[in-house]
């Protein structure tokens, strides 16, 4: 196509020269140039064999490709309603932008949503609301084996790697975390200077590629891990088992994004596409997983250590619970990533059809830990489309202790949901390694936006809880969240789901859990 374009331009230039030499009126050659170009384009369309549309409809067929290219923009700006866009609707994007900028986030004239539509959920207000706490509560992360517990904020920056995000985006996110006193998960792409320079609290995530703590062969390097985990800004260490948008497969960073800087941070060759394995080399059974978590905690000097997963088989998670009981140790936290979670790039089939959504994932993990008598020593984080105070309160009701946000934090630094994350052509400089594009993201301007968004969202969650008669998230109960089943029926979460009592799996498992609990094997990931 480049050769065709060169030929077309050359012929057009020749045509102009001929017309000019003939001494014809400028009007003649002004019309001749576009007509010649169109004629040559039509000839090229008829002779090419790649696109059937262009062979049958030369010239005009290009309109189809143009409209297809700009379809997402047309859909987002002119067609979709305020509340039905995907992955995030305009209402949600707007409230994030407004809170990040510190402007009003109010809506006049009432809701646009159909409150009688099946699936609609609502929080239950109290007839005796409470005063809103002046100081947001924090969650103590650290079980009996943890020597250096950490107090986690209710909302934090979820896992996003340097490489997937630009250096300026990382600087703004971490600077916002430092200013607001909340945590920033590094993602599995390694611990870069951009994570460390602003001084924000970090959750260092280690994935299957062991980036930043790997041997030349791609194995886990305990010495390098211990050295980096000792950094004062690293407050917690997380082992990534799976990710919501693509559970069961490893991450992919295109070679175009792997510059010298990223290669150094990740301990990988420059310019080559980086593919994380779908599985870990350091464990192959639930028992080995639990032992490795304990080893990571020891290597980090006793800092809180946990793992992240998108829930799949309940039987396999119960096997991990049995391994915790058998080994006498447990992670300090577990981050549950929902199937609706985001990613820079994933196969459509995985993003759409693999992995448990966050609601059911949280309920599974929470109830399994309660039933196994482990819940009091393990904190649960929730990750997957948390963008508003309502989202956060719902997840707390469903069993989480705190929340993490990724795409909402990207909105706060300027993301417009262009969905070009995997192309290195992000129009706002958030998900690109192109220096020219990345410079569009001004760190000094975006850093306070991250802080303001987190602060306003937590404040909204506390205000919602106060309206429900609750000041402490630990006092939220399943009956406080209700879902419409049909236009005439709605049920509370207490009625919709089974909630286990402490130690119930150890004493007498309920019928719905008995088969999975019996089959769960601490020495095998049974399918």
Image (cartoon, rainbow, N blue to C red):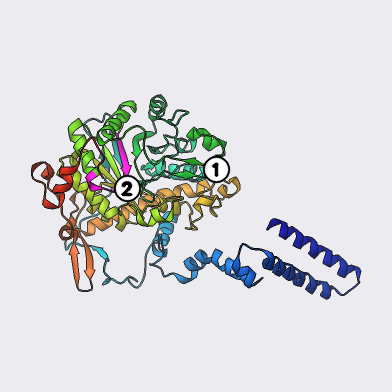
Residue at image position (26%, 69%) is: 118
Frontmost residue, 226 versus 511: 511
**Vertical side of 164 occupied by 94: above or below:** below
Residue at image position (48%, 42%) is: 171
Q: Looking at the picture, how far across and down is residue 123, in whole percent?
A: 23, 61
Disc 2 residue crowd, few under 14, some 14–19, many 20+, Cα 10 Å:
many
Quarter placement of the C terminus? top left
Can you see residue 302? no
**Vertical side of 394 occupied by 490: above or below:** below
Residue at image position (34%, 37%) is: 238
Helix, strand or loop at label 2? It is loop
Magenta part of the chain = 304-315
Q: Looking at the picture, how far across and down is residue 395, in whole percent?
A: 27, 53
**N-terminal-most mark, 2 or 1:** 1
In screen coordinates, is 163 left or right of 367?
A: right
Q: Is residue 314 magenta?
A: yes
Q: Which mark is residue 72?
A: none
Q: Which residue in the protein does label 1 denote?
A: 255
Q: Looking at the picture, how far across and down is residue 464, in whole percent?
A: 26, 58
Disc 1 residue crowd, few under 14, some 14–19, many 20+, Cα 10 Å:
some
Q: Which residue in the protein does label 2 denote?
A: 310
Q: Looking at the picture, how far across and down is residue 54, in whole percent?
A: 63, 68
Q: Is residue 423 magenta?
A: no
Helix, strand or loop at label 1? It is helix
């Amino acid at each position: 196509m480049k050769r065709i374009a060169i030929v077309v331009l050359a012929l057009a230039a020749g045509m102009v020269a001929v017309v000019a030499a003939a001494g014809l009126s400028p009007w003649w050659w002004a019309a001749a140039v576009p007509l010649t170009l169109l004629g040559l384009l039509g000839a090229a369309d008829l002779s090419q064999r790649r696109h059937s549309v262009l062979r049958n409809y030369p010239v005009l067929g290009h309109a189809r490709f143009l409209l297809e290219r700009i379809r997402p923009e047309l859909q987002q700006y002119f067609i979709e309603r305020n509340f039905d866009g995907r992955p995030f609707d305009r209402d949600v994007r707007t409230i994030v932008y407004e809170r990040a900028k510190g402007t009003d986030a109010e809506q006049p004239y009432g809701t646009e949503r159909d409150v009688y539509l099946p699936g609609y959920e609502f929080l239950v207000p109290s007839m005796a609301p409470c005063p809103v706490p002046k100081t947001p509560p924090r969650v103590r992360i650290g079980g009996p084996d943890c020597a250096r517990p950490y107090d986690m904020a209710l909302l934090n920056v979820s896992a996003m790697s340097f490489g997937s995000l630009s250096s300026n985006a990382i600087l703004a996110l971490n600077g916002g975390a430092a200013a607001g006193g909340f945590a920033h998960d590094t993602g599995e792409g390694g611990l870069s200077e951009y994570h460390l320079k602003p001084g924000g609290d970090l959750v260092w995530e280690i994935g299957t590629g062991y980036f930043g703590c790997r041997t030349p062969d791609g194995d886990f390097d305990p010495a390098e891990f211990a050295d980096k985990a000792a950094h004062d800004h690293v407050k917690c260490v997380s082992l990534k088992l799976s990710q919501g948008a693509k559970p069961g497969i490893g991450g992919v960073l295109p070679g175009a994004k792997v510059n010298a800087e990223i290669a150094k941070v990740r301990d990988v060759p420059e310019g080559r596409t980086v593919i994380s394995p779908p599985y870990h080399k350091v464990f192959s059974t639930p028992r080995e997983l639990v032992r490795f978590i304990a080893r990571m905690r020891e290597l980090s000097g006793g800092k809180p250590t946990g793992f992240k997963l998108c829930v799949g088989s309940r039987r396999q998670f119960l096997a991990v619970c049995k391994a915790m009981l058998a080994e006498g140790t447990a992670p300090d936290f577990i981050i549950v990533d929902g199937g609706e979670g985001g990613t820079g790039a994933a196969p459509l089939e995985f993003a759409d059809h693999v992995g448990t959504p966050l609601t059911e994932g949280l309920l599974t993990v929470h109830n399994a830990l309660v039933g196994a008598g482990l819940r009091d020593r393990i904190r649960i984080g929730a990750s997957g489309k948390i963008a508003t105070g309502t989202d956060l309160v719902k997840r707390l009701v469903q069993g989480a202790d705190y929340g993490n946000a990724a795409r909402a934090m990207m909105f706060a630094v300027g993301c417009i949901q262009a969905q070009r994350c995997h192309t290195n052509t992000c129009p706002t400089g958030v998900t690109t390694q192109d220096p020219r594009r990345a410079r569009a993201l001004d760190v000094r301007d975006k850093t306070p936006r991250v802080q303001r968004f987190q602060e306003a969202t937590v404040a909204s969650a506390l205000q919602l809880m106060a309206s429900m008669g609750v000041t402490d998230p630990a006092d939220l109960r399943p009956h406080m969240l209700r879902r419409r089943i049909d236009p005439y029926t709605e049920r509370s979460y207490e009625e919709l789901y089974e909630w286990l009592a402490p130690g119930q799996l150890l004493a007498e498992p309920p019928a719905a859990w008995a088969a999975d609990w019996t089959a769960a094997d601490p020495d095998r990931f049974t399918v």
